[in-house]
Image (tube, rainbow, N blue to C red):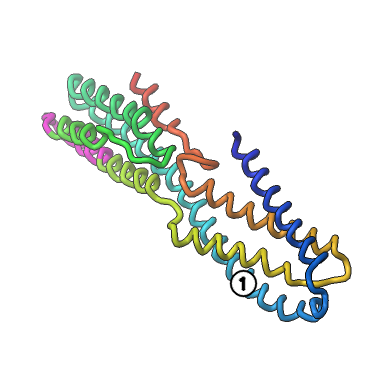
């Protein structure tokens, strides 16, 4: 089932449930004093709803930034791998060929072994770190006969260090997400915020039901967006390994 259809079902279901609750409470609940309680209930709703809106906004902004950073880290990693390969080819044909082959194997490891686990949000086993260490050793033991080759060797080593840093950032992003405590606060705050309007009263029951349903749908939509964005490599974000696929094509 697609992300959009699933989201529509969640949002629509929450709106229907909230509308039914609002209708039942207004239809069969106690009416005396309900309109007079609007001011008190409205003040509490303003406080609870305002605090909840700040929390949801903070979490969503942090998740949007995490998705962007995860994509940037993947591109930095792949670009650094290509740059290190090009710099190594200036040292010797043998070293350049070996680095190119190891870089290609590393990129395929990321695509085939690591990305499915990151997308599923599960632990995975990979030879990525050992392959990067082997790349570093190849560059380190390759001799440089003149100043230009020394500069190329230094450039290759620097690019590999950038690959190390970007790889760590990518793995950290894959292991991140919304903390369990934060999820509890988000869900509990959403329930409280939706339940408070049920205490309101007014002359038109249809208008009240529509307001409660709309508010419940909005809150559910924000929670669904939070759920989809908590893993940058899966769900609605779905950062793809296209940077490494492009690198494999460059390596031939």
| Magenta span contains residue 159 | yes
Viewer-nearest residue: 56 or 41? 41
Viewer-nearest residue: 14 or 104? 14
Quadrant (top left, top right, bottom left, bottom right) of the C terminus:
top left
Residue drawn at x 60%, y 62% is 190
Q: Position of residue 12 (x, y in %)?
A: 70, 48
Considering every residue shown, the one lying at the far right of the view is 203
Residue drawn at x 59%, y 39% is 3
Residue drawn at x 40%, y 33% is 116
Q: How many marks?
A: 1
Q: Main secondary structure of the magenta part?
A: helix
Q: Position of residue 155 (x, y in %)?
A: 24, 38
Q: Left or right: 216 with respect to 35?
A: left
Residue 143, above or below 25? above
Viewer-nearest residue: 220 or 37? 37
Residue 55, above or below 129? below
Q: Left or right: 75 with respect to 184?
A: left
What is the magenta range? Answer: 141-160
Q: Secondary structure at mark 1?
A: helix
Q: Position of residue 214 (x, y in %)?
A: 74, 57
| Magenta span contains residue 124 | no
Q: Left or right: 207 with respect to 218?
A: right
According to the image, label 1 marks what residue? Answer: 48
Residue 39, above or below 110? below
Residue drawn at x 52%, y 41% is 235
Viewer-nearest residue: 85 or 70? 70
Q: Position of residue 136 (x, y in %)?
A: 19, 35
């Amino acid at each position: 089932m697609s992300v959009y259809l699933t989201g529509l079902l969640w949002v629509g279901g929450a709106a229907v449930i909230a509308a039914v609750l609002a209708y039942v409470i207004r239809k069969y609940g106690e009416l005396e004093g309900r309109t007079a309680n609007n001011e008190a209930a409205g003040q509490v709703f303003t406080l609870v709803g305002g605090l909840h809106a700040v929390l949801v906004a903070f979490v969503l902004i942090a998740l949007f930034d995490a998705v962007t950073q995860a994509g940037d880290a993947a591109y930095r990693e792949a670009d650094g791998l290509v740059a290190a390969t090009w710099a190594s080819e200036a040292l010797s044909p043998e070293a350049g060929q070996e680095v190119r082959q190891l870089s290609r194997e590393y990129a395929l490891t990321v695509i085939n072994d690591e990305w499915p686990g990151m997308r599923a949000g599960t632990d995975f086993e990979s030879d990525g770190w050992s392959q990067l260490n082997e790349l570093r050793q190849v560059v380190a033991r390759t001799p440089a006969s003149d100043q230009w080759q020394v500069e190329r060797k230094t450039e290759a080593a620097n690019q590999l260090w950038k690959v190390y840093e970007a790889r760590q950032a990518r793995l950290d992003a894959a292991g991140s997400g919304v903390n369990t405590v934060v999820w509890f606060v988000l869900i509990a705050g959403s329930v409280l915020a939706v339940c408070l309007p049920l205490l309101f009263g007014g002359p038109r029951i249809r208008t009240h039901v529509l307001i409660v349903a709309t508010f419940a749908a909005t809150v559910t939509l924000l929670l669904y967006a939070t759920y989809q964005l908590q893993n940058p490599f899966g769900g609605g974000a779905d950062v793809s390994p296209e940077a490494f696929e492009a690198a494999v094509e460059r390596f031939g």
